[in-house]
C-alpha cells in the first residue's frame, strides 16, 4: 500500500523517532510503514489520520494492490 | 503478561544492532555447529574427535551469547507489552515459520528413531548422548525464531537509531 507518511512527517519537520513517539510505536515501525514494508493496523491508521488531521484515504492509497 | 511469565525474556532496551551478514551468521552457525559438534564427540573414539566436537559446541554457544541483546533477539524474546504492532507482526511471522520447521525436524527425528532402532542404526542411548540431544533440541527451539527473523528482515531496519 502506498502512503504519504514520509511527506507529511517531513512537512512538520519530525524525525521518524519523534513521529513514533506521537503514535506510540517504534521508529522501526514508522520506517517500515513509510517504505511500504508494513501496512499498519486499522487502529494505527486512524491514529495517523487523526494526528495529521486528514482522512485515511488522503494518507493511504491501496490502488494497484488489489 | 508479566516479565516473570516470559521464559526467554532478555532485554528492556532497543537491542544492539548488528550488520545483516553478521546477524545471519550468528543464527546459522550455531544451528550447524552444535549438531556437528555433538555428533563428532559422540561418534569419535579418540581425543581429537572429542576436542573438535566440544570446540564446535563451544563455538555455537559463543554465537548464541553474542546474539543475546541484539535487536533481533529482543523482538523474539521481549515481553509482548513492550513491543509495538510491527514488532509483534514480525515476531508472529518468525514464530510461525520456526514452529513449522521445528515440527518437521521433530517428525524426521521420530521417524529416524523408529527406523534406526529396528535397523541397527546409531541412536543416542547413554546419558551423554541423550543430554546432547536435549540441549540440541533446546537450542533449536529457542534459536529458530531468531534465525527466521534474521533472514526475513534486514536487521538494519530494526536498528534502534537511524
Image: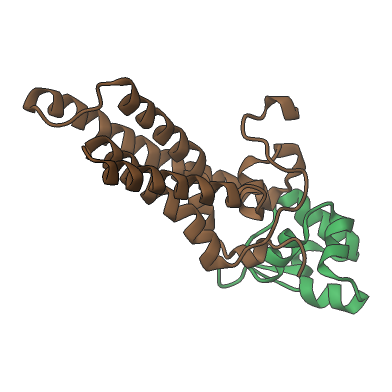
Chain colours: A green, B brown
Identity of the residue furthest to the front in this view: B47
Q: Position of residue B98 (x, y in %)?
A: 45, 43
> Eyeballing the image, is B81 above or below A50?
above
Q: Position of residue B100 (x, y in %)?
A: 40, 40
Q: Residue at x 69, y 64 (%)?
A: A33
Please tell me which residue lies in front, A1 or B24: B24
Q: Residue at x 35, y 45 (%)?
A: B51
Residue B152 appears anywhere in the view: no
Q: Is residue B66 left or right of residue B49?
A: right
> Eyeballing the image, is B91 above or below B162?
above
Q: Position of residue A5 (x, y in %)?
A: 78, 70
For the C terminus of chain B, the quadrant is bottom right
Q: Position of residue B153 (x, y in %)?
A: 56, 61
Count of numbered tags: 0
Q: Is residue B100 left or right of residue A18?
A: left
Residue B129 occupies quadrant = top left
Q: Is residue B91 left or right of residue B49?
A: right
> Eyeballing the image, is A10 above or below B148?
below
Q: Is residue B151 left or right of residue A24?
A: left
Q: Residue at x 35, y 31 (%)?
A: B133
Residue A48 appears anywhere in the view: yes
Q: Residue at x 70, y 57 (%)?
A: B16
Please tell me which residue lies in front, B42 or B45: B45
Please tell me which residue lies in front, A30 or B36: B36
For the N terminus of chain B, the quadrant is top right
Please tell me which residue lies in front, B157 or B39: B39
Amino acid at each position: 500500500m502506498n502512503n504519504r507518511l514520509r511527506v507529511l512527517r517531513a512537512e512538520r519537520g519530525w524525525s521518524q523517532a519523534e513521529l513514533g513517539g506521537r503514535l506510540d510505536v517504534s521508529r522501526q515501525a514508522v520506517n517500515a510503514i513509510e517504505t511500504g514494508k508494513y501496512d499498519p493496523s486499522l487502529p494505527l491508521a486512524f491514529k495517523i489520520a487523526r494526528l495529521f488531521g486528514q482522512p485515511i484515504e488522503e494518507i493511504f492509497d491501496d490502488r494497484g494492490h488489489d | 503478561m508479566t516479565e516473570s511469565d516470559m521464559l526467554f525474556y532478555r532485554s528492556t532496551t532497543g537491542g544492539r544492532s548488528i550488520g545483516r551478514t553478521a546477524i545471519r551468521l550468528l543464527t546459522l552457525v550455531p544451528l550447524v555447529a552444535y549438531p556437528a559438534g555433538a555428533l563428532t564427540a559422540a561418534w569419535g573414539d579418540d581425543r581429537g574427535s572429542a576436542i573438535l566436537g566440544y570446540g564446535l559446541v563451544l563455538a555455537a554457544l559463543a554465537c548464541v551469547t553474542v546474539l543475546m541483546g541484539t535487536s533481533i533477539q529482543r523482538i523474539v524474546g521481549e515481553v509482548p507489552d513492550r513491543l509495538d504492532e510491527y514488532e509483534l507482526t514480525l515476531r508472529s511471522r518468525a514464530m510461525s515459520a520456526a514452529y513449522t520447521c521445528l515440527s518437521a525436524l521433530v517428525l524426521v527425528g521420530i521417524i529416524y528413531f523408529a527406523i534406526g532402532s529396528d535397523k541397527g542404526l546409531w541412536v543416542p542411548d547413554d546419558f551423554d548422548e541423550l543430554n546432547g540431544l536435549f540441549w540440541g533440541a533446546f537450542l533449536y527451539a529457542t534459536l529458530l525464531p531468531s534465525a527466521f527473523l534474521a533472514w526475513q528482515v534486514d536487521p538494519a531496519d530494526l536498528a534502534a537509531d537511524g
